[in-house]
Amino acid sequence: MPQITLLQPTILNGFIRERPFPQNLLGLSLMGGPTGYPWPYWSYDIIRGNNRMSKPNVPNSEAYLRGMQGLGNVTGSFLYMRDKKQFTPTTLYWLRQPGELARGNAEAMVSREIAELDDAQNFFIEWAFWQGLRTGKIAVSRYDPPRVAIDYQFNAAHNVVPSPLWSDLANSNPASDIAKWKQVIIQDSGFVPTTIYLSSTTFSNYVLPNAKMQNLWSNEMRDQYMRTLTISGLFGFDWTVYDLTYVDDWTTPGTATNYQYIPNGVLIMLAPDGNPFGWLEGPSSDHDALEQNPNWTGKFAKSWLEKDPSNRVHLQEWSFVPTFERPDNIIIATVI
């Protein structure tokens, strides 16, 4: 049997911790790298905007006392993933063959097996980010534990529905609605929104054909959209179409259902300045990880041989939570 260095604990964990997330996952790209948080419960401050300016004063007189910046706090338990998988028969075949050719093939197959499980957990982090961003909450209600209920304390005024809805192409006015929502973010956060995220169906069916939006397009914008599904500068915003999907087979056990991270009919407006969101990695709960480092945070993996049935098992755990430090930078619009 060839010696596979990737199955050694130190190399295995170095590999998964340095492995980049799938580049097509927009949410992970927007959040950037995680921050390690070694305590079992996370907590962070919500920062509210304050546009109240200063005022003139008499030289050397008592200074005016400015009120505190609006602050809130969110605290909770980490979302925790712990998954394992058995290697496929093809991987086991190459692991059991002698020689350098077998070792090279076994390394490639093991790497693929580990990456597949790591990607699955990245998909859940992506799901959690978009759940928080488009609803202000993360809620998991299952027939079995754990249940999850995180409220990010988004301002109710930032969850909007236009009237008329954009599905009414003759009477709706997306440009007017967007202008109003932009002012809400500016007034509440102090930052200017410049980015919009939505699905291609929402854009193609309810923004693109609306007569009131037609005059805002330049030929360059049309070309850019056809090439990249993004538009820079349309009505002062960079529009990004995001159609990636995930498969959920645990909300209804045994039924695999495909969903979009951004459902049709939802539009998210964002002021990206001020670091409005991020994510934390929590401590490990695995005994083997804590033996290596009592303060281990982030993902941890291990692999072992099973005797009956004879197989190799790979396990990965990861605790995390998305954070939304500036929820006033965000507008969630249900437009159809």
Image (cartoon, rainbow, N blue to C red):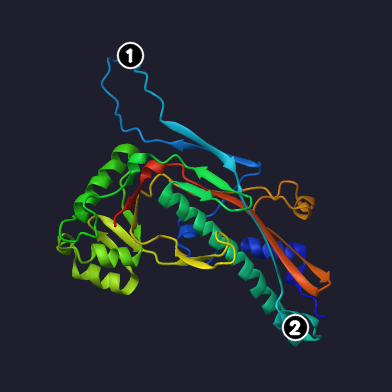
Question: Could you tell me how far apart the alpha carbons at marks 1 and 2 are, in whole angstroms?
Answer: 81 Å
Could you say which quadrant of the image residue 308 lies in?
bottom right
Residue 235 appears anywhere in the view:
yes
| Residue 309 at x, y percent in the picture | 81, 74
Of residues 207 and 106, the one nearer the viewer is: 207
Query: Which quadrant of the figure contains the C terminus?
Result: bottom left
Locate residue 259 relative to residue 228 in the image: left or right. Answer: right
- Where residue 78 appears, as percent x and y from the top left, is 60, 47
Rendered location of residue 275, percent (x, y): 44, 46
Task: Give neighbour class at mark 2: few <14, some 14-19, many 20+ (Cα, 10 Å).
Answer: many
Instruction: Pick whichever, 57 or 36, lies toward us.
Output: 36
Relative side of 112 to 188, left or right? right
Position of residue 181 measured from the top left corner of the image (x, y, whole percent)? 27, 46
Where is residue 227, by image quadrant? bottom left
Q: Which of 88 and 188 is in front in this view?
A: 88
Q: What residue type is labelled 1?
A: Asn
**What residue is at 60 percent from the left and 53 percent from the top?**
143
Callout 2, which amino acid?
Answer: Trp
Q: Quadrant of the N terminus?
A: bottom right
Left or right side of 308 for 231 = left
Which SS class for mark 1? loop
Identify which residue is drawn at 19% across, 63% down.
210
Question: Along the line of sight, which residue is nearer the eye, 253 or 333?
Answer: 253
Say which residue appears at 36% left-offset and 40% top-offset.
156
Are dots 1 and 2 in contact, CB under 8 Å? Answer: no
Picture layout, residue 248 above or below residue 72: below
Left or right, 154 with respect to 99, comes to: left
- Residue to which mark 1 is pinned: 60
Residue at which label 2 appears: 94
1 or 2: tag closer to the N-terminus:
1
